[in-house]
Amino acid sequence: DGGITQSPKYLFRKEGQNVTLSCEQNLNHDAMYWYRQDPGQGLRLIYYSQIVNDFQKGDIAEGYSVSREKKESFPLTVTSAQKNPTAFYLCASKATGSYGYTFGSGTRLTVV
Amino acid sequence: GQQLNQSPQSMFIQEGEDVSMNCTSSSIFNTWLWYKQEPGEGPVLLIALYKAGELTSNGRLTAQFGITRKDSFLNISASIPSDVGIYFCAGLLGGSQGNLIFGKGTKLSVKP
């Protein structure tokens, strides 16, 4: 079955450490997105990529980095520069010409 | 960035009651989407609307694309406990790159 997979589901890290969240899709979608979700804040766009080897900053890119070396993969690194990294992170993808996003099941990152 | 005003922020209802929520904006949208997010999971697309005035149903859910193209409504009839979750509206601005703009969500709680 085609889908979008985020791993791990839960992640704990010490303050000051970088951490990378995985997002893989086998839907053959061109566009991929990373969102951050905090209670009552809705979904805030971190980074997005419309095509391999290209990506753009979203509304809250500071303290995050991404890469898009393969169509299927769009990993997100939460760096030590991110002041408040504890949140629920959602990855999504979209086929060219369609409007709806397909979301992964999310990664809950807790920094202690 | 652009904003979608989604209301109400939360709802506590009795099983069997009908539910209404809406999203409004000062901008014109070409597409409206409604998603549902269950606890600890990613949002799932419920209904997509592509034309002003369009009314679309999905089981007990009915959504409408406002005539002014600046708003959309979602109704849930005869609510059941499994309707609990956060409902998000999302819109696509005309002339945009294709990035959806999300409302902050309506959290629905259903008492059996």
Image (spheres, coloured by chain):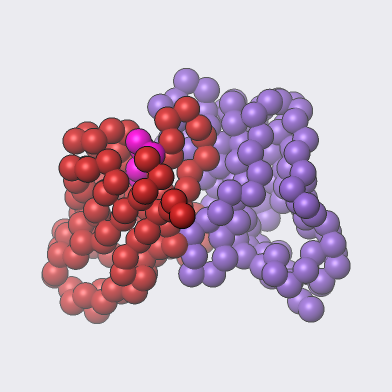
Chain colours: A red, B purple
Q: In the picture, which quadrant includes the N terminus of chain B?
A: top left
Q: Is residue B85 left or right of residue B73?
A: left
Q: Nearer the viewer, residue A65 or B5?
A: A65
Say if A77 sits above or below B82 in the image: above
Asked if the stretch drawn in magenta spans residue A31, the answer is: yes
Q: Is residue B82 left or right of residue A55?
A: right
Does the rendering let one see residue A47?
Answer: no
Say if A68 sits above or below B81 in the image: above
Q: How many marks?
A: 0
Q: Whole-percent x and y of residue A19? A: 19, 65
Asked if the stretch drawn in magenta spans residue A4, the answer is: no
Q: Whole-percent x and y of residue A47? A: 30, 44
> Which residue is at 22% across, 43% downward?
A70
Q: Nearer the viewer, residue A66 or B21?
A: A66
> Which residue is at 69% across, 46% downward?
B22
- Where residue B63 sits, quadrant-wise, is top right
> Which residue is at 17% across, 60% downward?
A79
Does the rendering let one see residue A67?
Answer: yes
Q: What secondary structure characterizes most of the magenta part?
A: strand
* View extreme (top): residue: B95
Q: Magenta segment, which residues? A: A29-33
Q: In the picture, which quadrant includes the C terminus of chain B?
A: bottom right
Say if A107 sits above or below B2 in the image: below
> Which residue is at 21% across, 48% downward?
A66
Q: Whole-percent x and y of residue A34? A: 34, 50
Q: Nearer the viewer, residue A63 or B74?
A: B74
Q: Nearer the viewer, residue B9 or A37?
A: A37
Q: Is residue A43 left or right of residue A10?
A: right
- Where residue B73 sits, quadrant-wise, is top right
